[in-house]
Image (cartoon, coloured by chain):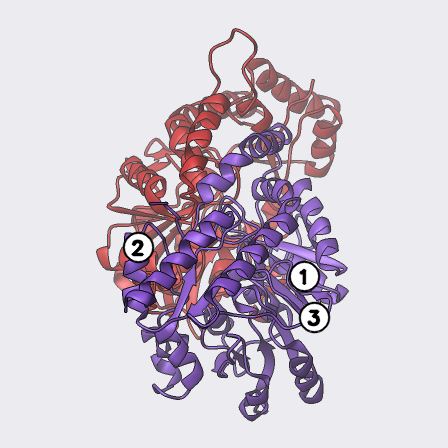
Chain colours: A red, B purple
Amino acid sequence: MRVPFSYLDRQFSAADAGAPKQILDVILDDIKEFVKSGDFTLGKKSEEFESKFASLVGIKHAIGVNSGTDALFLSLKALGIGAGDEVITCAETFIATADAIAITGANPVFVDVNDEFTIDVDLIEAAISDRTKAIMPVWFTGNAPDMDKIVSIAEKHNLLIVEDSCTAINGTYKNKHAGTFGIAGAFSFHPLKNLNVWSDGGMITTNEDQLNEQLRMLRNYGLRSRDEVEVFGYNSRLDTLQSVVALRLIDDVKFHTDRRIKIADTYDQAFNQMPQIEVPERHSHVRHVFHLYMLRVKDRDKLLQYCIERGVEAKVHYPIPLPYQKCSQHLGYKRGDFPKTERDCNTIITLPAHPYLTDDEVNYTIETVLSFYKANPC
Amino acid sequence: MMNIPYVDIGAQTKSLKKDLLAAIEEVLDYGNFILGKEVHTFEEMFASYCGVRFAVGVNSGTDALFLSLKALGIGKGDEVITAPNSFIASASVIIAAGAKPVFVDVRDDYNINPALIEQAITPRTKAIIPVHLTGRPADMDPILEIARKHKIQVIEDAAQAVGAKYRGKKVGALGDTGCFSLHPLKTLNACGDGGIVTTDNEKIFEELRRLRNFGLVNRDESVVWGYNSRLDSLQAAILLVKLKWLDEWNAQRRQNAKLYSSKLDGVVDIPGEQPHEFCVFHTCVVQAEKRSELQDYLQNKGIGTRIHYPIPIHLQPAAKELGYQKGVFPVCEEQSQRILSLPIHQGMKEKHVHYVADNIISFYRGK
């Protein structure tokens, strides 16, 4: 059996003859209508999607941009963060989080993770300096950081919060949606996200009117009108074609995340009793949307190989801690600075948990992992 | 009365709809939306179209320029020379890279005046960005000569000029890098933002490929802080369909320009073409007396026109910090008061051009 990590071919498979219309056909019909308009940059469909997204998240403004990375970058730029400033973030995340900070000219300041793949809030205050302007908590794997604590630290030290909620659409913390805790939140619509478009894409959420205005200018060359440029800006727009795609797929977000949660629960129950596997603690006040289903395991490399050989496309997100990447060299971190992140890089594994897996495939994945430890008791 | 919109993307897309949708469906079947094989194929085809070794697909023409600057190591403390009559992006990328734009006035051909470049060079000057505005190549020989002499780099802003030639060589093959926009309003256009950089230099090529994708050299290793600026696979598939038509579209635009030129000579200032130039007329910019009256008159006759651009970059509110005063670039500033872009897109046939030209003639006759 093959249990694929990607699900795009399944999500967008064409309808069999006589079968009900698949999402693909519905979207293609929309596109056929849309191309006639020639309205490919910003415009009506783009506004329609922004407003639908804002109401899904429960926020006043949503601003479509070219990617989740740009959502973070433009938020920082709009908040005036740049050279000489520091932004605190988690050491365990995708490169884009730190990258978005670094390309503003500011320095990312890394803080180690807790046992649940989010920033260890007890270590944040020690990382604050005179130069710290913001905290960028990451909803890594789709899990909520301890937002109560982060908000209270930010208030105490007068810091901004820009949430990297790129992987957490439909995720909540105490019933509040990801991306609504700070001054700005960033989302990604990359093809492997729970709201996915057919290219790169991103969104910024904010309740601030002024920030909203500024971001709309920044993403579109600082243009105030067709001809007047108020500030030097960027070209970072969510393609309107992708807004057309997203306007359909946004209706599937709940199905996607519910199904992921269900699969994660099945995995949790199967793996909880295994001494070689550490299932992170789950919290009832968090809706963890399992963009990634990650575990800490013994004999990781061997298990990974074992899974792949048996068709289970397991992965590692990610094997090299960000502070030790070559691009981070100038920040001066050394091995040992982030013990939990380092531990994770050697022990984490990501199992396929996408919404288009069948129950058989989920069971096969479980059996594969269990049979590995049966054959290799460690 | 005819209706001649300034642009008609809808009509252009409609005529290729079947091919475009088939191309989109192929991407969907394959499911690799990010840096898929379509991007690679388009890069190869585009490089060979321009006559260069390498091309790198990025998110926009703006990013093509920005990433070129970054790949050439240009940043804080550096100066970059460019023209003040371009779209804002030509200058905003310099600011975004942390460098300072230094403007040089243009000639009658709307392109940077090479005779004025040397006096703008300082020890901090790292590059010149000549803009091939309107689809006409800038005067590259003297520009390249100056660049060699002062050991500075040349980044071609070819956003409007895909297919244009200078002394038989395609634009994009003349400088250290060539930057193209594939925006919906361009002649070779995606159905969204898109851009591409051309170069013959393998090192620059490698650097650009890293920079557009988070500095990653493989899935897990990042060697420099980079960006997320990738040409979408879906857009590359669309562009592959359209690239086949590009020469035909450019030919139609050239034919339209020729007809305008023969009909409007002596009525308005209309661009000619020198023997060593091959212009692709992304825009057909004329200079006209009583411009705004003419524009209104044409609008009433169903003819859409535009102004590219009414406010020179150095006089934009955003450029205040650069400290330029009104009057420093007399040619550009005078042009900005008189220029008008006539519709010239490839969907226009002879009768449409006649209609526009005849209306311009009758406007001035009535005066």
Q: Quadrant of the C terminus of chain A?
A: top right
Q: Compared with residue A63, is residue A299 higher up or lower down, i.e. above or below?
A: above
Residue with the mark numbered 1 = B198
Q: Which residue is mark 3?
A: B174
Q: Which callout, 3 or 1, points at the residue further toward the start of the chain?
A: 3
How much space separates mark 2 and mark 3, taking CA atoms?
39 Å
Report x, y in % for residue B10.
Answer: 45, 40
Under mark 2, the amino acid is Gln
Find residue A291 and report its horizontal and vertical position in percent. 49, 35
Please state the chain letter of the residue tagged with numbered disc 1 in the rendered image: B
Q: Amino acid at mark 3?
A: Leu
In this view, A346 is above or below A107: above
For marks 2 and 3 on the same chain, the one whose residue lies earlier in the sequence? 3
Mark before the other along the chain sequence, 1 or 2: 1
**Front residue (pair B94, A110):** B94
Between marks 3 and 1, how big is the CA–CA gap? 10 Å
Q: What amino acid type is highlighted by mark number 1?
A: Thr
Location of residue B25 with respect to B48 vertically, above or below? above
Instruction: Tell me if mark 1 has few (under 14), some (14-19) or many (20+) residues whose alpha carbon lies within 10 angstroms of its own.
Output: many
